[in-house]
Image (cartoon, rainbow, N blue to C red):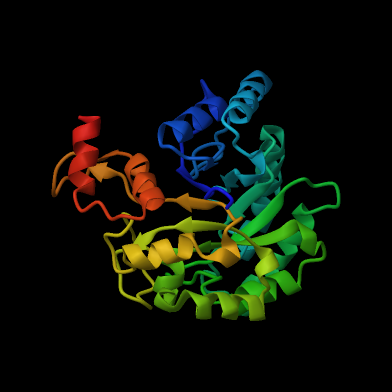
Amino acid sequence: MRELIIGSHVSFTKDEQLLGSVKEALSYGANTLMLYTGAPQNTNRVPINKELTLKAHQLMAEYNIDIDNLVVHAPYIINPANTDNLDFAITFLKQEMSRTEELGISKIVLHPGSHVGLGSDKAITNIIEVLNKVLNVDSKVTICIETMAGKGTEIGSRFEEIKQIIDGIKLKNKIGVCLDTCHINDAGYDITDFDKVLDEFDELIGLEYLKCLHINDSKNEISAHKDRHENFGFGTLGFDNLINIIYHPKIKDIPKILETPYVTKEDNSKERLYPPYKFEIEMIREKVLNNNLIDDIRTYYK
């Protein structure tokens, strides 16, 4: 049986870059990871350091980590759905794709954006235009459109909208989907019957387009359209349902990435300090809920 492909969001610092990202992932017991190549809220970027990238690749080879399972996340400030941002979206997304290629990573996750009053049809037309302008036959990067929760005027909360986008893409071998468990729950999909969700995805889009999963519990009930992640097994989705998704045989070869919240130093604190991923990955591998997860995290990092 092939090993579970599980990891989390990790940092990407100017001093260690991808090497530091891999070290962090290994400290969590992960065999994949997701990173931003710079702050997701701005355009500030440091050049990719080839020496650090080479060392990162050597470290991954040492620990049998397949670089094809790594994921870059495009910054939030790219909004390909809105006409006012098209030129910026095209330019900055091309830059992020180039940086992703420099790191040797083949997947970049993109939020399809919000129409901000334009309406979904015009927004989808804009998204298709942006993607067709950034994708080319020589690109080594697949853009994975992320499923969204439907907050505000977000595009991509329904599989039908994702299908519309993919239908408009010329180079369909350069496009994919990233399915987020919290988002699809908040969008109205019942993950307690994940077979049905997968069947609907396959019928509308095709499972061949599913390239990665974001594994997050949700603070909200189904159809809330709010997008608030919760720690693994401690939200409305529940431990058993999430485990069922992670170990589902139809998606066993797809990387699963945790984006669950950092843990605060104490209850009712707003300061999030401690990454939960080491402990959540242990739970996932053992398939046993740790009811003392938060306390154990606080004790470990104290």
Q: Is residue 132 left or right of residue 80?
A: right
Q: Residue at x 59, y 53 (%)?
A: 109
- In this view, the residue farthest toward the front is 1
Residue at (51, 73) in percent of width and height: 157
Please name the residue shown 59% across and 46% down the image: 71
Question: Quick check: can you spot residue 168?
Answer: yes
Task: Give the total of numbered labels.
Answer: 0
Q: Where on the picture, by quarter, is residue 274?
A: top left
Q: Is residue 169 above or below residue 161?
A: above
* Coordinates of residue 43 in the picture (x, y in percent): 56, 39
Q: Residue at x 38, y 68 (%)?
A: 241
Residue 146 visible in rendering:
no
39 or 215: nearer the viewer: 215
The foreground one among 3 and 157 is: 3
**Frontmost residue, 263 versus 29:** 29
Q: Residue furthest left?
A: 267
**Left-right relation of 233 to 255:** left
Q: Is residue 191 above or below residue 146?
A: below
Which sits in the foreground, 184 or 133? 184
Image position of 152 with respect to 212: above or below: below
Give the x, y percent position of residue 103. 66, 33
Q: Quadrant of residue 113?
A: bottom right
Locate the C terminus by quadrant.
top left
Which x, y percent locates residue 178?
A: 57, 60
